[in-house]
Amino acid sequence: MSKLWGGRFTKSTNQLVEEFTASIEFDQQFAQEDIAGSIAHVTMLAECSIITNEEAKQIITGLKTIEEKIKAGSVPFSVEDEDIHMNIEKMLIDEIGPLGGKLHTGRSRNDQVATDIHLYVNKKTHEMIELVTAVQQAFVNQAEANMGVIMPGYTHLQRAQPVLFSHHLLAYFWMFERDKQRLVDSLQRVNWSPLGSGALAGTTFPIDRDRTAALLGFDKVYPNSLDAVSDRDFVLEFLSIASILMTHISRLSEELVTWSSQEFDFIELDDSFCTGSSIMPQKKNPDVPELLRGKTGRVHGNLFGLLTVLKGLPLAYNKDMQEDKEGLLDTVKTLDGSLRLLAPMIETMQVKQENMYNAVEQDYSNATDIADYLVTKGLPFRQAHEIIGKIVLYAIQQKKFLLALTLEEYQGFSSLFEEDIFDVLQPKHVVDARNSLGGTAKNQVCKQLEEAKDSLKVDDQKVMG
Ligand code: ARG
């Protein structure tokens, strides 16, 4: 059979054009959504007496047969039929005869493709929410197992103040929590139905858009047919959320790589998540976090790709919009793979508690606490800061850490120092002194952990609906 749109043409399509314009190679991944959309459309056409019930029945049976064949991998998709929509329509006509040609009544590929992508993004958003939750659970488990472990906290990658390792991990928990909230929130906009908008202006048939929306599980129909077929902001939103999420994954990965280095030696990733070197037998490389960090590039790129595709398009549909798919599919694949690896990698990493603690003992990250000590004795903070600066400089010159200075040495800088300064400087004291809400004191971090666990329970309920 010739092209489904061949009537107006006198020449066949140039082979290169056919290959260049076809999208079947990638949009076959929307087959399930396409068939679901078609079944809803046909059901509605019969209910509105635009086709008969018998016709609808036959078309639906045909579509289901095709769905089974596609699932079984036994259909040869053809570039000649350009995209998934025309491939399936052609298969339907082959399957049930010319009656199959009634499927496209009151519909265009423009509202059809938009519907497919909405359904696909909805499905993938739900999947991503589940995967993010698994990663959050891994943070919670490690935070719980290592409660009380002290590590250096950094600013500018310089040791700043000691923190609890669990506090550091839970920082990522909350980043992922907001990513998840963004995913959940976006569903409000993903769940609009474009179906029934036709090519751009609606249709002359007495269709029922609310009915197809309800059949497909959409919450609302697009009120404007032009908007419905010409925007892809819901895809941009998904890609944006994915980009932020990948940025979080990338920052975490960077820390995992750093912490696994011999210089830090704070953690060891499980052997099953590392690879070796083909030349250096001693190497155990953190390839997974490195690649997670690297793959962030393509996820950001996919967002920028689509922003750029859309930015100059006049309403309504333009063929440019076919470019919305590959980036989306790539981002879904990348994010899916990344999240699936991340959860078990976090779960199985070994935390070198002693090395973290030793690091804290060999730095000056308790300096702020000496300043706070003098402040509690009545000295203004600025003056205290100045004095401690001098003490730190003195200690560095003496090649000593702050706990190793004598009381006499301290008193040489201020007569306010007493014996209790040595308790104040203990790492555990330094940590527990930060007992402000959201601070690193064990008491606060335990509370935070409970809040994290509670929010996992609440989120579960929300997503399950
Ligand atoms: N393959 C097309 C796409 O992905 C489907 C819509 C085509 N519509 C059209 N009028 N050419 O965007």
Image: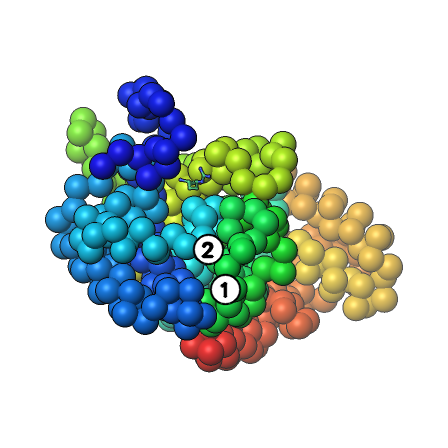
Instruction: Please state the horizontal and vertical placement of residue 299, each as a whole percent of the image.
Output: 45, 41
* Amino acid bearing label 1: Ile
Residue at image x 59%, y 41%?
316
Q: Is mark 2 within 8 Å of ligand 1?
A: no
Residues under labels 2 and 1: Cα distance?
7 Å
Side of 445 relative to 420 (left or right): left
Residue at disc 2, secondary structure: loop
Q: Residue at x 45, y 70 (%)?
A: 48
Q: Position of residue 49 (x, y in %)?
A: 42, 69
The residue under label 2 is 106
Tell me which corner region of the image, top left, top right, bottom left or bottom right, holds residue 142: bottom left
Q: Nearer the viewer, residue 394 or 93?
A: 93
- Please tell me whether residue 324 is drawn above or below residue 9 in the rendered image: below
Q: Residues within 10 Å of mark 2 (few under 14, many from 20)?
A: many
* x and y, in percent, of residue 342 in the image: 35, 55
The residue tagged 1 is 207
* Quadrant assignment for the N terminus: top left
* Residue 345 point in image, percent of width and height: 31, 55
**Along the viewing direction, whichever of 133 and 121 lies nearer the viewer:** 121
